[in-house]
Amino acid sequence: MALPINVIDLIHQRKVERTRIEYKADWNPEPIIHTITAFANDFDNMGGGYILIGVKEENGRPKLPLAGLDPDSIDSIQLDLLNKCNSIEPRCIPVIEPYTVDGKDILVLWIPGGEDRPYKCPEKVYTQKGGEKSPKAYYIRKGARTLKANAREERELISMARDIPFDDRINYHADVTDMKPALLADYLHMVGSDLYENALNRSVEDVSTDMQLVRGPSEYRKPVNVGLMFFNEHPENYFSFAQIEVVDKPDPTGIGMTEKTFKGPLDRQLRDALAYIRNYIIKEYVTKVPDSELAVRAFNWPYQAVEEALSNAVYHKSYQIHEPITVTVTPEKMEILSLPGPDRSITDEHLENRILISRRYRNRRIGDFLKELEIVEGRNTGVPLILSSMKNNGSGLPSFETDEDRSYFLTILPVHPYFLPGNKNSEKAAAEKSFLRRTREELRGLILDLLARQGNMSANEIAYALGYKTLNNTVRAVVNDMLRSGEVTYLYPDKPNSRNQKICITRESESSD
């Protein structure tokens, strides 16, 4: 059985967070059993994790070339692993899949968050039969480390015993066949999973079982909620108002107001709503700066900020609450409302300072699917991306609101000053003046941010994205300084003058920023 993800992306942490991946150079039972237990306990509701056996770690990344395992040891490792997993209480068996990558054999263990948590396992795992028995303990993940739970964490873990996230619960009002084979196959194709090859030739139950989308005894198999949210054409039949509503309100009286409702699988409704906003709501303003080669470009709302804010709303909304996600557009602002509000670990002071680092995820499985589809990221990067894209666009800072009961969460994106009615001339002049005052250090930061968000770009593309009409001497000089310092590099170092040349951010710059 293949995994419902791309194993190359997994190895290189392209879609799954580092905290959910554990690299092991070889079969080492004790730490691996501890980590299986920790991922199954899913203390922060992040969706469990993966253990890659046969992959060495170097500075938090896989060491290349891969170490691999002795092919003759694969079967014996799997047998020993299954025996050792019997010591976990309650019993927990990961999905085990052998892969050959770059000619090296590795084992990938997938451990979803367990529905029977809390789990505990022996503190000492003996390799020889008949060894002395060890006391059992609870293990959890803290960042990228597996740790034995302390007394407080143990109590909290026990209190979470029946608190399975709603998106990962069994839906007893639906049948496995309510998930559509075409939608399952499309998803597997988009993420590059090896499961896609035979997806249409197998039953929905077999494919969805491999994807951990069904549970229950063989005679009474039922889908979990997230399977209906992504792989049924009408999830609103199971989750009332699982939809996005976009309201464009150009006048306070409601004259000229338009409303659009987007339904369907969560990823589709999100893409459709974003496409509508990009095509019909977002506008661009371009003007040439007098007596200068520069052209100032700005959007009423930068698309990336809207994309991040709306994607986060889909990710974190409670689908037990029968209210839609609402996007309200007025001449002054865009408001994105979802229910309920953030976890109480995010304080009012955090909201005021625009620091939203969630300690625990509400929808662990929804997040997994959206990340695999490259729609959202799960590293608490959404708010920083909103802030940086608003700043780069010359817009005001966003604000985030909730109430004392945490009953709602509202993201407010102010319109760019150019687009404020009756206030264009003075705001335009101020924005142009600010634009011309960019220092080299500011340009350096903007260029690094561009490359981190959009990938490799030519020097001309960088200049245009920064709002310049052409590649001017200042931008060229800053790029050359960054090439010399090693912050960025050429895609084709041996051909610096190639017409296909691109500028790439280095790993050191990416990690430091």
Image (cartoon, helix red, strand yellow):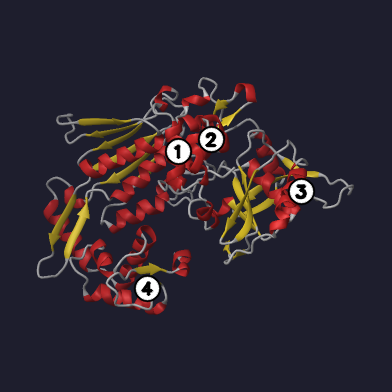
Q: Which residue is mark 4?
A: 492
Look at 50% across and 54% down and name the residue there: 9
State left or right for residue 503 relative to residue 58: left
Q: Is residue 132 above or below residue 156?
A: below
Where does residue 100 sit, x and y in percent of width and height? 59, 56
Residue at the top extreme? Answer: 173
Separation (CA) of disc 1 from disc 3:
34 Å
Q: Nearer the viewer, residue 122 or 128?
A: 128
Q: Which mark is residue 80?
A: 3
Q: Which mark is residue 185?
A: 1
Q: Secondary structure at mark 3?
A: helix
Q: Which of the 4 image quarters holds residue 22?
A: bottom right
Q: Is residue 354 visible?
A: no
Give how far apart the Cα atoms at labels 2 and 1 are.
9 Å
Whichever of callouts 1 and 3 sits on the residue coming sooner in the sequence is 3
The reply to whether discs 4 and 3 touch (Cβ–Cβ < 8 Å) is no
Asked whether disc 2 touches disc 1, contact meaning CB atoms under 8 Å apart, the reply is: yes
Q: Position of residue 16 (x, y in %)?
A: 52, 50
Q: Which residue is mark 2?
A: 207
Q: CA distance from mark 2 to mark 3?
A: 27 Å
**Disc ID at residue 129:** none
